[in-house]
Image: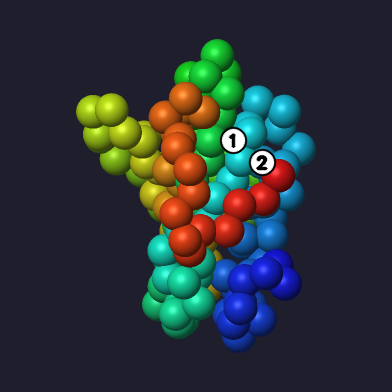
């Protein structure tokens, strides 16, 4: 997480982010995990959530999204979690809160939906 300035000041966020990146990095169906929001812009504080864009290969998108509960459990012990209604032509969002409290927004996208990165997000793969 060395490429996320200030993350060391948010240990619960850092630990959850590391677990999430490790989880999706090992899934060959996922082509990228992109950090967005205040963490990517280095303006996060204790109350900030973690915005992660999970980019899945088109043919595996449904399977990856269907495993969202298993992913949430693999990252820790969720306090609560819910799926946000899909945005037409956009992501399917899965919101999870972990002890800390730390809120994680997983925004799932098909690979074909993703264009060039704008300034700000940090991608791992």
Q: In this view, does 54 lie above or below 89?
A: below
Say which of 18 and 80 sits in front.
Answer: 18
At x 71%, y 32%, the residue is 27
Q: Position of residue 106 (x, y in %)?
A: 46, 46
The secondary element bearing badge 1 is classed as helix
Of labels 1 and 2, earlier in sequence is 2
The furthest residue to the top:
59
The furthest residue to the bottom:
9
Q: How far apart are marks 1 and 2 (CA)?
A: 12 Å
Find disc 1 in the rendering and name its residue: 70
The secondary element bearing badge 2 is classed as helix
Find disc 2 in the rendering and name its residue: 24
Q: In which quarter of the image is the C terminus?
A: top right
Q: Where is residue 4 in the image (x, y as percent from the top left)?
A: 62, 71
Say which of 59 and 67 sits in front.
Answer: 59
Which image quadrant for residue 49?
bottom left
Q: Is residue 1 above or below residue 85?
A: below
Q: How crowded is mark 2: few (under 14 residues within 10 Å), some or many (20 or more)?
A: many
Say which of 70 and 31 sits in front.
Answer: 31
Q: In this view of the protein, can residue 73 be seen by the observer?
A: no
With 20 as the anchor, is 108 left or right in this view? left
Q: Position of residue 44 (x, y in %)?
A: 46, 77
Q: In this view, does 100 lie above or below 53?
A: below
- Number of the front mark, 1 or 2: 2
At x 47%, y 61%, the residue is 119
Label of residue 48 in the image? none
The image shows a total of numbered marks equal to: 2
């Amino acid at each position: 997480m060395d490429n996320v300035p200030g993350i060391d000041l948010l240990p619960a966020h850092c630990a959850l982010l590391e677990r999430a990146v490790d989880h999706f990095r090992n899934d060959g169906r996922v082509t990228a995990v992109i950090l967005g929001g205040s963490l990517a812009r280095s303006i996060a504080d204790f109350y900030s959530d973690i915005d992660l864009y999970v980019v899945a290969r088109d043919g595996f998108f449904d399977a990856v999204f269907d495993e969202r509960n298993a992913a949430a459990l693999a990252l820790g012990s969720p306090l609560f979690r819910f799926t946000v209604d899909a945005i037409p032509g956009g992501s399917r969002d899965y919101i999870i809160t972990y002890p800390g409290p730390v809120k994680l927004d997983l925004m799932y996208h098909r690979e074909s939906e993703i264009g060039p990165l704008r300034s700000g997000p940090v991608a791992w793969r």
